[in-house]
């Protein structure tokens, strides 16, 4: 094991997890031959452009339109790729969503709609419900993201303020047949929460969405409150307009964690998987897993194989006014760094598989036993950075950031502790 370089191994584990969810790898296995008749491709999410590229690699040029994050476009032969804002929607996303709905109008029962959906679609696929404006959606989305609410609760609100989420995209295509291919970025892989479920029904109510806003003390525009009190267009799971839609998850966090675990075992490491659905406040979870890593480290005996602790899921961060530059993965890791307090033999990486942690073009960061001493020698105060939610700035100063660029996929957060 003397040749094992901890930072190299952790980076390779992350790269392997991302590669396992590459649409060019996973879509050809489920597409099959191109069906006869008219095919229209639509979609939204950080992986949607890469998914469209994979579809045309197998089926050739197709008609359609997908919406992805700025910087995540891919070259396609027939499918139009539109870039828009994430995580707070913008006018480009609204205009593209309207055009997408226009493509679906007038389709018949012999036509097929292929829907390509991935994480990020909640913001990118944006059609404010009747009586609401883009500004209304932007205000509510920004407040929810800063509140620390779990993604399931955020998406419950999003779908009840939308004319396209909660099954309404599939309803717009009815009576055409729809086949929805999903890349999951949510704990539990529930299709109703992936991009706020544009192709599947939902059992939540507008009243429940209003309660989410009240529970998190979100001040909402008057039009939003009126809309939720009146109900919404979200469809029930058994609605007739959803009866011709088939939904398939083609990539999920568990597959990526297993790919990373396989690599670690191949390098002679023992692996403990903590699951792909760990949630909670990033700082609290970071401290918890750091303590777990120290417990494992203290029990190790001479000659034991290196141990890798793997986990996935989605952390949240409750932000004050005027926070620093951070994201849930780097906040997780900064809290772990404080808790480890220079413990020997422990390295860790936390990064978002979509390449973006928070609003920064940085996936995450990597730490080792010397990181805390290096930070203090550089005049950095990790506790102050954590309190100010300024973890990206902290790790940038340490030259410890993980910056893969657009990964063109999205299977949630990836975390790994390596114990030697």
Image (spheres, helix red, strand yellow):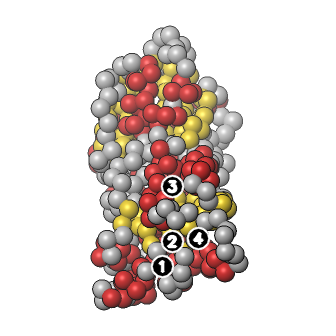
Q: Disc 3 versus disc 2: distance between alpha carbons?
A: 13 Å
Residue 289 locus on image (x, y percent):
61, 73
Quadrant occupied by the N terminus: bottom right
- Disc 4: which residue: 419
Marks 2 and 4 close (CB-CB < 8 Å): no
Marks 4 and 3 close (CB-CB < 8 Å): no
First in sequence: mark 4 or mark 1? 1
Q: Residue at x 29, y 76 (%)?
A: 397
Residue situated furthest top in the rendering: 36
- Compared to 213, does 397 lie above or below? below
Q: Disc 4 versus disc 1: distance between alpha carbons?
A: 10 Å
User: Which quadrant holds residue 375?
Assistant: bottom left
SS class, disc 3: helix
First in sequence: mark 2 or mark 4? 2
Q: Residues within 10 Å of mark 3 (few under 14, many from 20)?
A: many
Q: Residue at x 61, y 56 (%)?
A: 268
The answer to whether residue 64 of the structure is visible from this angle is: yes
């Amino acid at each position: 094991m003397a040749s094992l370089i901890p930072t190299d191994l952790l980076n390779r584990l992350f790269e392997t997890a991302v590669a396992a969810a590459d649409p060019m790898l996973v879509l050809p296995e489920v597409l099959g031959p191109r069906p006869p008749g008219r095919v229209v491709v639509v979609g939204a999410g950080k992986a949607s452009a890469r998914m469209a590229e994979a579809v045309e690699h197998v089926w050739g040029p197709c008609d359609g339109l997908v919406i992805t994050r700025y910087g995540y476009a891919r070259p396609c032969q027939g499918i139009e790729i539109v870039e828009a804002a994430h995580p707070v929607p913008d006018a480009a996303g609204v205009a593209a969503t309207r055009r997408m709905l226009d493509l679906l109008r007038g389709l018949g029962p012999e036509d097929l709609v292929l829907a390509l959906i991935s994480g990020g679609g909640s913001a990118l696929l944006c059609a404010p419900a009747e009586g609401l404006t883009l500004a209304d959606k932007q205000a509510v989305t920004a407040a929810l993201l800063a509140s620390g609410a779990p993604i399931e609760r955020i998406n419950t609100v999003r779908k009840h303020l939308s004319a396209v989420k909660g099954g309404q995209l599939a309803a717009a295509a009815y009576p055409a047949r729809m086949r929805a291919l999903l890349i999951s970025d949510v704990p539990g892989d529930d299709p109703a929460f992936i991009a706020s479920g544009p192709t599947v029904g939902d059992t939540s109510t507008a009243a429940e969405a209003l309660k989410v806003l009240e529970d998190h003390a979100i001040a909402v525009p008057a039009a939003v409150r009126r809309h939720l009190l009146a109900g919404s267009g979200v469809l029930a799971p058994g609605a007739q307009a959803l009866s011709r839609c088939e939904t398939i998850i083609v990539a999920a966090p568990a597959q990526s964690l297993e790919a990373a675990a396989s690599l670690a075992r191949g390098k002679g490491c023992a692996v403990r998987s903590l699951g792909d659905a760990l949630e909670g406040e990033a700082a609290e979870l970071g401290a918890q897993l750091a303590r777990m890593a120290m417990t494992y480290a203290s029990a190790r005996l001479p000659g034991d194989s290196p141990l890798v602790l793997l986990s996935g899921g989605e952390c949240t961060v409750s932000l004050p006014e005027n926070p620093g530059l951070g994201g849930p993965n780097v906040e997780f890791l900064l809290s772990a760094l404080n808790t480890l307090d220079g413990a020997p033999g422990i390295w860790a990486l936390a990064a978002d598989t979509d390449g973006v942690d928070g609003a920064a073009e940085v996936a995450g960061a990597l730490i080792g036993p010397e990181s805390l001493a290096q930070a203090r020698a550089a005049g950095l105060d990790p506790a102050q950075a954590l309190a100010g939610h300024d973890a990206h700035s902290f790790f940038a100063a340490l030259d410890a950031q993980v910056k893969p660029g657009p990964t063109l996929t999205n299977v949630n957060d990836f975390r790994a502790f390596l114990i030697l």
